[in-house]
Amino acid sequence: MEARKIEPAEPLLSINNIEVVYDEVILVLRGVSLDVQQGQIATLLGPNGAGKSTTLKAISGLLKTEDGEVSRGEISFMGERIDKKNAEDIVRSGIFQVMEGRRIVEDMTCVENLRLGAYTRREGNIKEDIDMVFNYFPRLKERTGLAGYLSGGEQQMLAIGRALMARPKMILLDEPSMGLSPLLVKEVFSIIEQINKEQGITMLLVEQNANFALKCADYGYIMESGKIVLDGSREKLLNNQDVKEFYLGGSDERKSFKELKSYKRRKRWL
Amino acid sequence: MNTDLLLQLTVNGLIVGLLYGVIAMCFVLIYKSTQVVNFAQGEFLLIGAWICWSTLVWLKLPFFVGFLLTLGFMTLFGILIQAIFLRPMIGEPIISVIMVTIGLSMFFQALMKWIFGTAPASYPQVFETQTVSVLGMNIEMAYILSLIFSFIMMGGFYWFFRYSKMGLAMRATAFDQQVASSLGISVPKVFAASWAISAMVSATAGIVIGMVNGVSDSLSFIGIKVFPAVILGGLDSVIGGVVGGVIIGVLENLAEFVDSQYLHVGNLYTIAPFYVLLIILTIKPYGLFGTKDIERI
């Protein structure tokens, strides 16, 4: 926390101690706080069921479509509170979520999917932007059939392209590597980095694949059972013994199974 | 064999069938975007036809003014029906939703009878010439009008779903509501819009039919007739609805031909479409054009 207080600029997105409850009973997030700076790629890592996707849905407002709500804390984007807003207003204010599992509209063509991404836009040339997306993902241009017949990787590219069409200030990516071959994961991540550099779009990346995610992220948060347990810059996380051991696989020295327990004690609670 | 009659009936069947197709599209529009099987579709025709009739006969307005007023009224009507009766039903079992629409259907039928009486009423003369002769057949002017109306509506729907923003949004909502809201689409707005459009177009169809046959209770029966057309085409296919409508329209008239020339059982034309429906559904349970989900294996 000390380190972040010195940051001069106001964060683009800031989540302050939120709790999320599903169905009015099930507590999923227990006090999550994180900041994403303008122009950064931040990543949120953690095991299954830690609450990563829920955090993204809390930001994008999609939580409300699943009977969930932010019951405590606040989320602000560009200095404005968004946790009470509904999903379409949040899209209009500049946050676009690429949901887990791609979720492109299967019975539409690529171009129709892309035009759908631009639904909230009132100005700008949509044709030009479609060309811009095809520039990033040249292989989508050749696919003229229904999007449901695209390969998994192409669907992921289409989902990211669709997000670009909305000209967002920030994209929330939920597991873009899911179900893709390592080579494709590499390709998708390098394009994500490229988009971040060229378009200046801030990204919050949720991943299981910590290796790839930490390679392209500037800052990382690690989440376990509804709480952030560790955060730091890429270098700090990559050099952290725990992260190496639990998320990156392999560590410098062999450890005995007995020592694993010590991890719990060394957790840092935010 | 009476070829002239056969030809005349086939042409009638095509024209009526296209009209059924348009109403089927309205039905599919509601089903696709809001998952409501709307049994009150026929009442949209009835209400639209009566409202327009009353603006012409009671208020003595010129046709176009009355027509536009009716469209405005139906838009509002569709939105209100959705907001008041169907929105609370979101997430409820389909059978409850169906009961609501059946209830609405009965209620509005009775309401129309109460306001306008049970006697059929005919529209004031809108066109000067009654019939035109095409290739030796006498075709009523109103039929030509309905043909033009059907084509305009179909073209309109095609354009709407392919190129307009709202049309794309409706298709996205039909595909997955959560995806739609993640794209910034307001799902309640899409619901309201689909009911409004459906009510408006159905009402226009009601007016067109009213001009030919007069306005009476039988208009709401068309809503039931469109049902086999929709199921035949596949509940969620707009094109299927049109094809289904044409098939039902032609079949009806062919059955009428066979009946009047050979069988003399009477009223065969009302049930023939349902027989064909049974046969086709046994072979293709999803209808002719119903979607099978795309699955990559």
Image: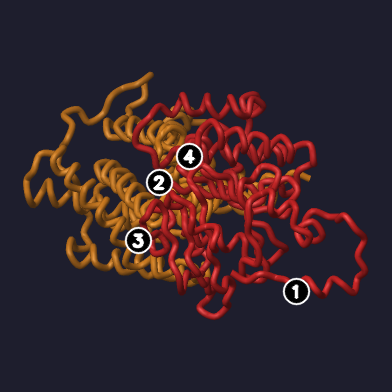
Chain colours: A red, B orange
Q: Is residue A36 visible?
A: yes
In the image, what residue type sits under mark 1? Lys
Residue found at x 21% / y 52%: B73
* Pointer 4 chain: A
- The type of residue carrying mark 3 is Gln
Q: What is the spatial separation of the Cα atoms under label 1 and label 4, in whole angstroms? A: 46 Å
Number of the front mark, 2 or 3: 3
Residue type beneath disc 4: Leu
Identify the residue at horizontal 38%, vertical 34% (top origin).
B156
Tag of residue B23: 2
Can residue B258 be seen at all in this image of the molecule? no
Label 2 is placed on what type of residue?
A: Ile
Residue A258 in the image: above or below residue A3 = below
Q: Between residues B25 and B9, which one lies in front from this camera angle?
A: B25
Q: Which residue is mark 1?
A: A264
Q: Are marks 1 and 3 in contact (CB under 8 Å)?
A: no
Q: Is residue A115 left or right of residue A105?
A: left
Query: Which disc is residue A130 wearing?
Result: none
Observer-nearest of A61 and A11: A11
**Residue A123 image-quadrant placement:** top left
For mark 1, does the 10 Å Cα neighbourhood hold few (<14), some (14 to 19), or many (20 or more) residues? few
Q: Chain of mark 1?
A: A
The disc at residue B82 is 3
Of marks 1 and 4, the one in the foreground:
1
The percent coordinates of residue B116 (x first, y second) are 18, 61
Q: Which label number is shown at residue A116? A: 4
